[in-house]
Amino acid sequence: QKEVEQDPGPLSVPEGAIVSLNCTYSNSAFQYFMWYRQYSRKGPELLMYTYSSGNKEDGRFTAQVDKSSKYISLFIRDSQPSDSATYLCAMTLGGSNYKLTFGKGTLLTVNP
Amino acid sequence: AAGVIQSPRHLIKEKRETATLKCYPIPRHDTVYWYQQGPGQDPQFLISFYEKMQSDKGSIPDRFSAQQFSDYHSELNMSSLELGDSALYFCASSLTGNTIYFGEGSWLTVV
């Protein structure tokens, strides 16, 4: 079992929909949580970074962390065709260890 | 804002050849990471450097080596290339591991 499990999708939604992307993890030592967006054959782009349980909002994106349940989510409001990409959750232990452990990624398609 | 710069963006090598990838981190970032991403896979951590010293090692084959130079750029050297080494190789950088930013990647094809 991978340390980080991510709903594989693929996910297809109409433009304007609210999208929910989720990851669970098994290692309670993970302290820092990130969401990356990756377009085909491009580098992962950092979208959100959080380190505490609760919600963090940035524009149309909201990252949610529940450390007690070892569960993180990314919500995208008013989704746009340009949001079509693979979304990767990632996490690190912190301290002196910032190696990222990724989920498998969810391929999202937003249809106009 | 300056980003992580990787070169070359694409390269094609034959089996058993050697390839070198270069990475220029974001200015003032002190940590460099290398990741390998196979088709349809998530990025896998290879190795990292903090202030020019190796700080962590992941699933990097013995045929691969890396180093970080005095100007903070890093190089990943891959020898005796195999077909299975074909992948997208990412370099990333951070300032004391806070938030990690990736380059656009170098696409290696081994034929």
Image (cartoon, coloured by chain):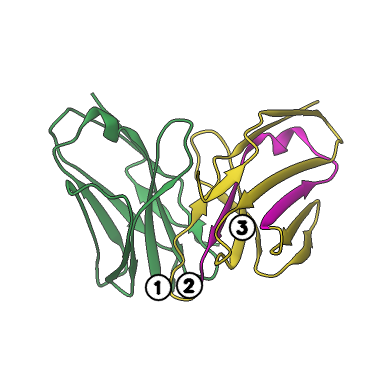
Chain colours: A yellow, B green
Question: Dot 2 lies on which element?
Answer: loop
Residue A48 lies in what quarter of the image?
bottom right
Q: Percent from the top left, x then y, of residue B36?
A: 37, 44
Q: Amino acid at mark 1?
A: Asp
Q: Amino acid at mark 3?
A: Met
- Circle number at residue B95: 2
Residues A73 and B71: in front is A73
Residues B88 and B72: in front is B88
Q: Is residue A22 left or right of residue B3?
A: right
User: Magenta stretch containing residue B85, yes or no?
Assistant: no
If the image is split into quadrants, where does the C terminus of chain B sit? top left
Residue found at x 59% / y 68%: A31
Residue A32 lies in what quarter of the image?
bottom right
Depicted B84 relative to depicted B42: above or below? above
Who comes first in sequence, dot 1 or dot 2? 1
Q: Is residue A13 left or right of residue A95?
A: right
The CA distance from mark 3 to mark 2 is: 16 Å
Residue found at x 50% / y 43%: A1
Marks 1 & 2, CB-CB < 8 Å contact: yes
Residue A13 lies in what quarter of the image?
top right
Marks 1 & 3, CB-CB < 8 Å contact: no
Residue occupied by mark 3: A34
- Count of numbered badges drawn on the protein: 3
Dot 2 crowding, Cα within 10 Å, few <14, some 14–19, many 20+: some
